[in-house]
């Protein structure tokens, strides 16, 4: 009987290694849904580094993924395991990953542990994870450079402590396919208990051999492969899935990745990274625009049903926020199509609890005077008023918001784009603020571009307040 080879997608997990591929909160949610739809058995995400935003990100992705397992890495300490599990436990299929170095250099210089201490840390952390979920993975992240006797001890310790998947990595990507196969077979021979769990494999693509090495790993008995749906210096999900689909009978294996839908979904994933946020493939976008149109007379149920039709599953709180934003736009527009609704959801939903609420703003500007702005924010029902003078209405509004919030943050990015065309076009703005070395993004949507800019700035302010414990 053929056995399944699970493909574990690492695109989201590796985003933290590539600043040029940074995605927004919403874009990560969109990507997770696409990976779920493509049939990835496991979707790997970044863990918790001690911030509230990390936990919020994991919770949101965990609730958005319906079929795939969601895997988050943990540090080698109980406190971090508890924090990651608190965020991940709402997933339909949660997995905890214990990632540890097993080569002498990494143990000593990165983890600052001797071999005996590392073995004990692996054993304790895996056992702690196993108390919370049956799906625990041990990842030997630099296995190919380790002393194989110590590697065997680490693998045995992880299995004894409760790991159900053991992944061996060639983090340097230095092995040829046959060398990697022989390496896996040696470890299997040294640790008979590996036959009782799932053997996983991961290879860096430094020599452009990662795909071939994973195919060789399948021949050695690996039944879980780490790959990425978007180029991430590792094996290609598309290539690996295609080889298994076309030649899986050679090894008596199959995969659940939906290769028929691969090209279309891959194009959507690529569009996210190219900056075409929230857009479907051209044919789908056109169909949505033609088939889905709301009017100012539609009720809340119709609006939320339309949001579900374009791919959003909103909580009760988010649904209320989207409905309120829709009503605000509908006061100035007779009709709202799928693209506009998508922008409304992106701006209104999936946000942190609001510390600041915009009550009102007044802008005055002209060609003979500098722009002036007055804004009023609510915080715990207290009115905070601020005024500002600037080079244009948006600059003045941002300075007024700084005065009202009594805080100054560097403006790292400000973007404006039209969601639709024509005189009554809706505009979407993106604001990114820098606080203590970290970026916080906010989005706003309105037919009034100044209003959209203010909404985006307040959204970013709320994320800073949430993360830094001001809420």
Image: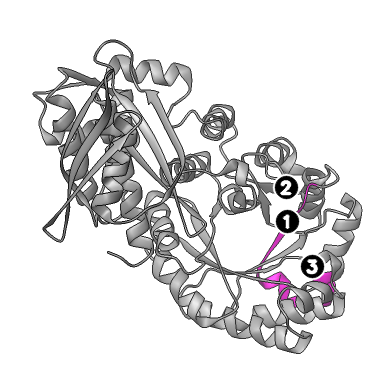
Q: Residue at x 39, y 70 (%)?
A: 86
Residue 362 in the image: x percent, y percent? Answer: 16, 34
User: In the rendered structure, which disc, 3 or 1, sits on the residue that comes first in sequence?
Assistant: 3
Query: Is residue 203 found inside the magenta-colored segment of the image?
Result: yes
Q: Residue at x 73, y 38 (%)?
A: 243
User: In the rendered structure, which disc, 1 or 2, sits on the residue that comes first in sequence?
Assistant: 1
Residue occupied by mark 2: 234
Question: Horizontally, is 336 left or right of 46 in the view?
Answer: left
The answer to whether residue 131 is visible is yes
Residue 2 in the image: x percent, y percent? Answer: 67, 50
Element assignment for label 3: helix
For marks 2 and 3, give the CA distance.
16 Å
For marks 1 and 2, give the CA distance.
8 Å
Cβ atoms at labels 2 and 3 below 8 Å apart: no
The answer to whether residue 191 is visible is no
Q: Residue at x 24, y 30 (%)?
A: 306
Estimate how packed mark 2 is, as few (under 14), some (14 to 19) or many (20 or more) residues with alpha carbons within 10 Å: many
Residue occupied by mark 1: 202
Please provide the residue range marked out in magenta: 187-205
């Amino acid at each position: 009987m053929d056995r399944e080879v699970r493909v574990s997608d690492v695109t989201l997990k590796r985003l933290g290694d590539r600043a040029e591929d940074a995605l927004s909160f919403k874009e990560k949610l969109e990507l997770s849904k696409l990976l779920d739809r493509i049939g990835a058995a496991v979707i790997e995400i970044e863990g918790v580094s001690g911030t509230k935003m990390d936990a919020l990100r994991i919770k949101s992705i965990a609730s958005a993924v319906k079929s795939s397992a969601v895997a988050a890495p943990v540090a080698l300490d109980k406190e971090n395991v508890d924090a990651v599990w608190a965020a991940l436990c709402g997933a339909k299929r949660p997995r905890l990953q214990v990632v540890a170095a097993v080569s002498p250099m990494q143990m000593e210089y990165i983890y600052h542990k001797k071999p005996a201490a590392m073995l004990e840390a692996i054993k304790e952390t895996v056992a702690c994870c196993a108390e919370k979920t049956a799906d625990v993975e041990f990842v030997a992240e630099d296995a190919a450079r380790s002393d194989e006797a110590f590697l065997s001890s680490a693998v045995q310790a992880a299995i004894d402590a409760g790991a159900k998947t053991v992944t061996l990595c060639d983090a340097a990507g230095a092995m040829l396919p046959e060398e990697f196969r022989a390496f896996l077979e040696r470890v299997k021979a040294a640790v008979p208990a590996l036959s009782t769990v799932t053997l996983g494999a991961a290879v860096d693509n430094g020599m452009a051999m990662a795909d071939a090495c994973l195919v060789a790993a399948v021949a050695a008995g690996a039944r879980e492969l780490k790959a990425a749906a978007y180029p991430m210096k590792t094996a290609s999900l598309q290539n690996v899935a295609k080889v298994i689909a076309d030649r899986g009978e050679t090894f008596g294996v199959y995969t659940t990745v939906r290769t028929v839908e691969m090209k279309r979904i891959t194009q959507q994933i690529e569009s996210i990274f190219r900056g075409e946020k929230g857009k479907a493939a051209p044919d789908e976008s056109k169909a949505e625009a033609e088939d889905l149109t709301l009017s100012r007379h539609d009720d809340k149920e119709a609006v939320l049903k339309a949001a579900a039709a374009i791919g959003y599953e909103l909580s009760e709180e988010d649904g209320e926020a989207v409905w309120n934003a829709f009503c605000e736009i509908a006061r100035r527009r007779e009709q709202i199509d799928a693209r506009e609704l998508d922008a409304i959801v992106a701006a209104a939903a999936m946000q942190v609890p609001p510390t600041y609420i915009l009550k009102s703003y007044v802008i005055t500007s002209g060609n003979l005077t500098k722009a002036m702005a007055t804004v009023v924010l609510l915080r715990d029902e207290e009115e905070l008023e601020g005024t500002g003078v600037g080079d244009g209405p948006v600059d003045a509004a941002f300075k007024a918001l700084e005065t009202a919030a009594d805080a100054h943050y560097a403006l790292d990015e400000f973007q404006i784009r039209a969601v639709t065309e024509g005189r009554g076009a809706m505009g979407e703005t993106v604001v990114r603020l820098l606080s203590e070395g970290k970026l916080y993004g906010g989005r706003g949507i309105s037919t009034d571009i100044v209003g959209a800019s203010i909404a985006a700035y307040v959204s970013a302010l709320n994320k800073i307040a949430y993360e830094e414990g001001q809420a």
